[in-house]
Amino acid sequence: MKSFLFRLYLSWMKFLSRFTTMEDNNIVVLNEAGRSGSNGYIFYKYLQLNHPEYNVTLVEPWPSSHLNWKTWQKIGAAKYIITTHQPFKARKGQINVQFWHGVPLKRMGIMANNTKRRDNQRNANLWHKTADIVTSSSDLYETLMSSCMAIETNKYKKLGFPRLDALKNPIIPKEKLLKDLFNTEDKNAQIGIYMPTFRYELEDKSVMERIKQGNFFAFDDFDGEKLNAELKKRHQYLIVKLHPYEMRLFDNFNSQYSNIAFLNNDYLFDNNYDLYELLGNTDFLMTDFSSIYFDYLHLNKPIIFVTNFLKQYEKTRGLLMGPYEEITPGICINSQKEFIQNLDSLDNQQIRNRRLYWLDLTNQVKGDNYSEKVFDYMTKYLGD
């Protein structure tokens, strides 16, 4: 019922917003990706800095039933609507540029084990009718997306993703990131970041209970003090960036450890940062089934894959490719003991070669300035 009422609300607001005057230089970014690698937010900042001749509006959070009428007027008056999740238009004549928010590893839509046929058909119809272009990075990306969303091949344009511009150009120095999150100075610092996927989908209350108790890895052998000591010995620092739902389980975000810090959305929003604008300062990534690792390949730095819930996740939702060990170019661990054992040897030539192999598969758009590529295409070829 809640979903039906919200769709009704959207339909009504779309109808009302059509009575505004649409202008060719109006762009609206509907950002549903928060500040964790948001193509929309990065593209918004690019437009503000480089194209003041355009009126750009950032709408977040999206979708929301709490938007004021002035915001809906801007949505209705926009020539270009930029989206990071489902495509959207308020009226005929608008152009939808669909960024999406990651190279998919997890099954979704038609391919997922935990979706309904009716919802999948509705989504496929929405993509067909609403998305004018879907930015892409490779043939593999297009194959994965179409298998899940039934997107027609002529909608794809290999322009790359704006978030990658931020990845390669950190907005602050590594020293400031270390000072902000760990309140320390260390010339020998090696910073890692742990970014797991949405583990609530496992439908396992014991996992959420472990996280609530501070066991952010949900390892059977988790010992925070021991892990912190091992990191400290090696001048290593670990940033923990959990899904917002999991972060809300903590009473507070203040770490009791010297070399482990929680990164929450308040820090990002207060400083007008996106996570990807900081990610280039890190020295290694830890994740499980998050598509962030495909982007991290652009940095050619070590990646550690946490597999303690692999079988559960494959059963609950599923992965688009496998076997998992073959598609993950890095060390796989399923316990804290294995993590510590590998802290001194996170990388080698064989792993580096595998990273480059997967980078070639997932990125055929060479060069930089992906935001500029998108802007040039949408204004020169779609605006007429």
Image (cartoon, grey):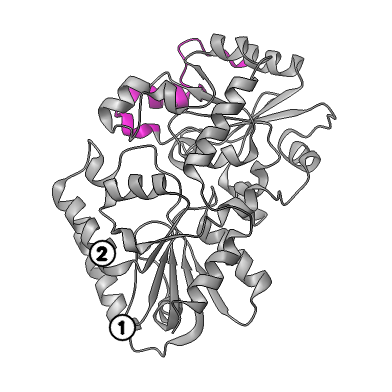
Q: Which mark is residue 16?
A: 1
Q: Amino acid at mark 1?
A: Leu
Q: Amino acid at mark 2?
A: His
Residue lying furthest left: 118
Secondary structure under the numbered disc 1 in the rendered image? helix
Placement of 34 over or under 341, stated as above or below: below
Which residue sits at x=42%, y=54%?
Answer: 100
Placement of 88 over or under 337, stated as above or below: below
Point out the stretch of residues depicted in magenta: 199-224
Which residue sits at x=45%, y=75%?
Answer: 80
Placement of 146 over or under 21, stated as above or below: above
- Is residue 121 shown left or right of residue 163? left
Counting from the top left corner in percent of width and height, residue 295 is at 54, 42
Packing grade of label 1 (10 A; few <14, some 14-19, many >=20) is some
Placement of 7 over or under 165, stated as above or below: below
Circle 2 is placed at which residue position? 128
Residue 22 visible somewhere in the drawing: yes
Rendered-image quadrant of the C terminus:
bottom left
